Amino acid sequence: MSGHSHYDTIHRQKELNDSKKGKIYSKMSKEIVIAVRTGGGTDPNFNYKLRMVMDKAREYNMPKSNVERAINSGTGGAALDEVTYEGFGPSGISVIIQAATDNRNRTSQEIKNVFERVGGSLTGPGSVSFNFENKGLFLIKKTDSPEEQTLRLIDLGIEDVEETDDGIEVYVTPESLREMREKIEGAGFEIGQSELYMKPKTYVTIDQAEVAKKAITFLETLEDLDDVQKVYSNLDIVE
C-alpha cells in the first residue's frame, strides 16, 4: 500500500472547481502546446505525452475547439519554456513546481515572492526532487466494495494502491501508463483521472489546523499563478 496525502484529495477537488471556472482549461492549453513541441508532434497515437493531456482534458470536459486550438498553437506561435523549480515551504514541506512560461525572469520572481511571504525558500535542482518518484497515476472510481476493487487491482499486478475519499489511487511506472490503462479498463474498472505525477517517498505530516491552513494556502497560491502548471508537495494533513 502506498503513502498518501489528504492534500491530494483537496487538490483534486480544487481542480474540479477550477475547471468549472475555465481556469484549468488555460493551464491545459499550455500543457498541450508543450506536449506537441516536446513529445513528438500533433498525433496522440505517436505522442503519448499529448495523449495523456488530451485524456485529462476530456475528463474535465474541456471543449474540443479549445483542444484543437492548443494543438495548432503547438506548431507555431510564441515560444514556451518548461521550467522546474524546487523549494521548501512552511513547516519544511518539500515543493516541486512545473511551469510553462515565455518569460523566465517574471515567473521566477513571482514564485520566489510566494515562497518568501511564508518564510520558505527556493533551492537548487535536486535539493527536493530526490524525495519524489516519477509515476503514472490513475484515479479509479469507487464502487460500494472498494476493498474488493483493491484486491482485484493487486491481482492485476499493481502493488501501489491506496483508497482515498474520492476514489482509489493506482500508481504505475510512466512507461507502462498506456498498457496499464488498457489492462485496468479491460478488467472493468472506470478511470476517473489519469496523469503523470511526482510521488513523494516521505511526507511531512501536519496535525494542527492553523498550520495546515497556512500550508494549503501557500500551495494554492502557487497553483493560481498563470505560468504554473503543476505543484507537487510532500504535505500530509491529518484528517
Image (spheres, rainbow, N blue to C red):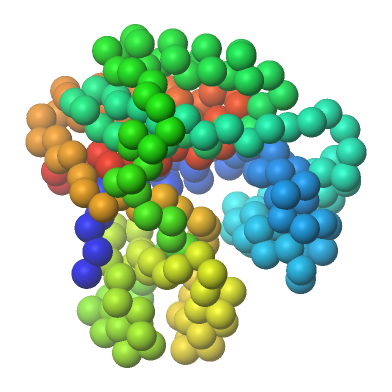
Q: Quadrant of residue 70?
A: top right
- Quadrant location of the N terminus in the rendered image: bottom left
Image height of 108 relative to 231, above or below: above
Residue 77 pos. (x, y %):
88, 33
In the image: residue 86, left or right of residue 235: right
Q: Residue at x 75, y 43 (%)?
A: 33
x and y, in percent, of residue 162 in the image: 27, 66
Q: Position of residue 48 (x, y in %)?
A: 67, 64
Residue sitting at x 82%, y 44%: 74
Q: Nearer the viewer, residue 145 or 137?
A: 137
Task: Note whether residue 62 is visible.
Answer: yes
- Which residue lies at the image location 58% right of the left edge and 32% below the top edge? 83
In the rendered image, which quarter contains the C terminus? top left
Work out which residue is located at the far left of the displayed protein and give it: 207
**How many numbered marks, from 0 up?**
0
- Residue at image location 36% in from the left, 85% down from the top: 157
Residue 21 appears in the rendering: no
Image side of residue 50 versus residue 70, left or right: left
- Quadrant hosting residue 231: top left
- Rendered position, 80 above or below 12: above
> Where is residue 114 shown, x and y percent of the image?
41, 15
Viewed as shown, does residue 230 lie left or right of 32? left
User: Which picture quadrant has residue 89?
Assistant: top left
Query: On screen, 204 above or below 55?
Result: above
